[in-house]
Structures are given as C-alpha cells and as structure tokens.
Image (cartoon, coloured by chain):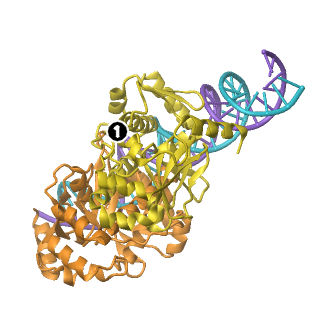
Chain colours: A yellow, B orange, C cyan, D purple
Amino acid sequence: MTARAQSRSAELRGQTQSEREVRCRDCTLRRQSAFRQFSPAELTFVARMKRAHVARAAGEQILDPNNTDGTIYTLYEGWAARCRKLPNGKSQILDVLLPGDLIGLAANLLGSSGHAVHALTAVTLCVLDANKLAMLFREQPELALGLLRGRLQEQERADARLAVLGQMGATQRIGYWLSDLHKRLTERALARGRGWRLPLDRRQLADAVGLSRVHVMRALRTLREEGLAEVRGRMSTVNIPDPRRLARFSGYAELRSKSVCPIL
Amino acid sequence: MTARAQSRSAELRGQTQSEREVRCRDCTLRRQSAFRQFSPAELTFVARMKRAHVARAAGEQILDPNNTDGTIYTLYEGWAARCRKLPNGKSQILDVLLPGDLIGLAANLLGSSGHAVHALTAVTLCVLDANKLAMLFREQPELALGLLRGRLQEQERADARLAVLGQMGATQRIGYWLSDLHKRLTERALARGRGWRLPLDRRQLADAVGLSRVHVMRALRTLREEGLAEVRGRMSTVNIPDPRRLARFSGYAELRSKSVCPIL
DNA sequence: CGTAATCTTGACCAACGTCAATGTTCGTGG
DNA sequence: CCACGAACATTGACGTTGGTCAAGATTACG
C-alpha cells in the first residue's frame, strides 16, 4: 500500500464511523427516500446478518469473480465499479456502484460471478453473511421480494445501457451515462447542486461507454461546446448546467426507475 | 390476422397440446435438466398460479411495456424477443426468449417494464397469476430463491452482452450471439445436430447485435468464409460446423451459466 | 407470371480507433 | 520551495470499421 493510500484510509477511518462501529440501527443510508424502508423485524434480521464493517483503499479489489467466501457487501461510503475483462485484453466497466448498492449476490448464489468489483475511491463496506440468505427468504418474504425487485430494476438499467451502446453515437453515450449517474447521485443526496467529482480517469470512462480514450475526449469536447456538460481535469470535476437538456439530448427521457435497494 | 397466420395458429393448436390442455403436472419442459426440479408442493403451488394456456401468432405483441394486467407468462413453445425502442426511432432486441423463459416479471413487480415482448414464431404461453407472487414468497421460499437465481443468471448474460457490444467487432458480435443462442438451444434440446432455423430476418439480427442490416451481411459473409457459421436465406437456416471453434473465435469461452428457470 | 418484400452486393461516406507529439498534473527527491 | 520525471490529458493526422445509398438478385405470394 502506498503512503498516500495509507493516509487516505486512516483519514477515512478517522473522519467517519470506524470499522464495526456502524450499527444498522444508526445507518444513515436507510433514512433516505431512495431506499426501501425496513420494518423493525426486518431491521433486526439484517442487523444479525451483519458481520463487520470494513474499509478498502481506492483501487483495491472488493470482489473476486471466482472466490466466493460466503459474504455479500453493501457499499456504505465511496464509489466502486463492476467490471469484466475480455479475452482480447480489453475490459468493460459494467456499472458504477454507489452507496447502498449490493455487491456479491450473484457470486454467492450462482457460485461465481463473471465480473470483479474494484473500489474507485476509498470505501467502507457492510459485510453480510451470505449463508443467512436462505433464512432470509424463509423468515422475511417481504424483504426477499424487495431483493428481487432491486435486481429487476438493475436489469431495466442494464437493458437501457445495452440499447444505448448498440444504437447511439459517442456523444450521446457519454451524455446518457452522465445523466444516469447524475440521477442516481442526486437520489442519494450525493451530488448537491450541479457539480460533483468523478473518480474515474479517461481510460475508465472509455471502458464504461465502450469507446477509445481518444474518442471520449472528442465527445467530451462536443458536450462542452454544446453547453451540455463539462468534464474537467484528471479525477474530473463534472458540471451539468441543465440536466434536463442533457437528458433530452442523450435520450435519457424514458426513465421511470427510482432506485430501491432493499438491504443495507 | 392474415389467412396465413390463422392457418399457422390453427395448425399449432392442432398439432400440439391445445389451450388449457397443458397441465403443469404433464409439462414437458420441467423434465429437462436445464430447469430447476420442483418439489411436489411447489408443483401444486405453481399449478394453482396457472390461469390459462394461450397461443399467439408470429409477430404479435405478448407484453406491452406499460400495460400490466396482473399476469406473467412462461414461454412454452416458440421463440419471442424482448425489445426496446429508442427515441431516435431505432430499436434494440435485448434478448431472445426460448421455451421456459419468464415474461413480464419486471412489468408486474415494478409497475412498468421499459421493454416489449414480441412473438418471433407462433408461440404458446402459460398464463400465471402475478398477484400470487407475494404468496409464493411467503409459502415457497425455495422457489422464490430460485426466481432470484434465475434473474441473477440473466444479469450475468446481460453483462456479457454489454461487454461484447462495447468492446468487440462486428464479426465477433454475431459469432458471440450465435454461440450463446446455440448453447441455450442445445441445453433445451431444441437444436439437434448443428443446424437449426433462425426465425429472425436480417433487420432483427442487426438490431440484436447493434449493427446495420448491410454490415450484418458483411459479417455473415466473413463467418461463412472462415468456416465458422453459415446463416442462409430469409428466415434463415443456421449451421455451425464447429461450435467450439466459433466460441473460441468470438470470445464465448467464459460461460459457466447453465440456465435455471424456476417457474413454468 | 408479376409484384412486393427481403436479401445481397458494391461504391461511397461518416464515425470511431490508432499512433504520435505536446501539454498538464501530480508525486518525488533534492 | 523548486526541479524533475512519470503518468495522464489533450490534440492532430491518418487508417479502419461500420453506416448509408442505391442497384440488382432472390424469394414469397397473389
């Protein structure tokens, strides 16, 4: 670990609730309207599933595609990326994960997952016991149904991404990706106003939208010239003057999905 | 309905088990190893969910994206396509549905679905009562867990498709698509030997892999010249001399997913 | 046999990828 | 604090891939 990563992770532990310290009862995520509200019984059940609260530095791998250790995670603070490597060496960022998102469900329920998860920033994670999932389905059917709902919503988003990659041009792809991200951030009260920090470099942004690094630049320039979005500098600052206009431009008009993430 | 469609659908009803005639107990799909095996209790539960068995002609819409009428379907015979229209008029085929696949889960559990489902051939469908889903989660937790597993598997396939669309060239995209289809068909004993009929025209194939009609031709020609796959004529005949070789060529090597479809 | 629809191919053009050169940021060591 | 080097951002030039247009071939169906 580099000196910088050490200091960052120390700073993180210092500034925020430290490991094992975040009790489900006090969880700040659950309070937000974007998430499903728990009944008292559900809350105690989930609290018993929770085994630990851990931190990872930026860049570290959170989930190994092959190695299922019987744990699932909820991302509590920070950003992560689901990615998949292809035989030809290229890699695709399947999705950006934000606080409240679930990690490792597929790996545990299917045995392996085909994708890895990496921390984009320093993160903290709730560690949940995957072996209690069967019990969850027996004792908390409402919660189980919520879990399914969450996956179905993810599928809707994945469908939309597929259509965008398949049918739209470079500028719109990036516009769409930014719109989706912006919506998810504001839903979770993570982007106040119109600007936020984007912890992806150009290479990663390119892998996310299926373009080359260089062409991403051209598309970003177009977005800037049209006044639709500004993405500046390394570890970029994003500024979207008029989210509506960007959404219209990039075809991000058909969105009905309010994220509901059932487990913390 | 055209005269032809009428005769087809009549023929279908005549040759196969007719409407309301397919009892879950006798369902031939469930017998295949590709599907989850039901316990007696689960079987009776699902049998009680089943409201009817209906037929649709090729081209008919099976699921309206906005109109949820409290039913979900299991495709019993024939092919269907999940598709999504984009604001710019283009459309994307998100996935091909084969016998055993579930239709309308998202539409019912989320309220609307963002995609439509169309019959590619004449089809028959099990009609299931979506309102009994909550009860299913309460009374049949194992089955509910299977339902979630099925969705997670779909997500794995969707992830792979996204990576393919984002990172690979035309020929490989089509090769991958054919490989995936071939595997699913043989799993379900729908393609004996190496050849089968593909009920998609070139436009639909293009929409599925995110290319133009014309470029699909070029890619198909390449595949033919390399001896990897032959796709011939309108309402095409597909012939894959060596599925392994095609899979290697198109990057379809990372597949661990044996389809498990939990509800009939 | 004729018409319409789709398949198929060639010619051309736009979008995107690759390569290479230059600027910019950031971390490191004097 | 400054100077340097490495990694990344940015831009231009050029090649490749894939889209568009249009014409002819084939098939389905009246």
Q: Which one is nearer the viewer's eye here, A95 or B149?
A: B149
Image x and y of residue D25, in percent: 36, 61
Question: Does residue A210 appear anywhere in the picture?
Answer: no
Question: Does residue A195 appear anywhere in the picture?
Answer: yes
Q: Which residue is disc 1 drawn over?
A: A32
Left or right: where does residue A128 sit relative to residue A236? left
Q: Which residue lies at the image location 33% right of the left edge and 50% below the top edge?
A: A153
Q: Disc 1 sits on a residue from what chain?
A: A
Left or right: where does residue B91 sit relative to residue B46? right
Q: Which one is nearer the viewer's eye here, A103 or A81?
A: A103
Q: Residues within 10 Å of mark 1 (few under 14, many from 20)?
A: few
Residue B204 sits above or below residue B147 on the image: above
Residue D23 sits above or below residue B202 on the image: above
Choose top left, top right, bottom left or bottom right for residue A191.
top left
Q: Which one is nearer the viewer's eye here, B172 or A123?
A: A123
Image x and y of residue B46, in percent: 20, 73
Circle 1: residue type? Gln
Quadrant where the N terminus of chain B sits is bottom left
Quadrant where the C terminus of chain B sits is bottom left
Image x and y of residue A65, in percent: 54, 61
Element type at mark 1: loop
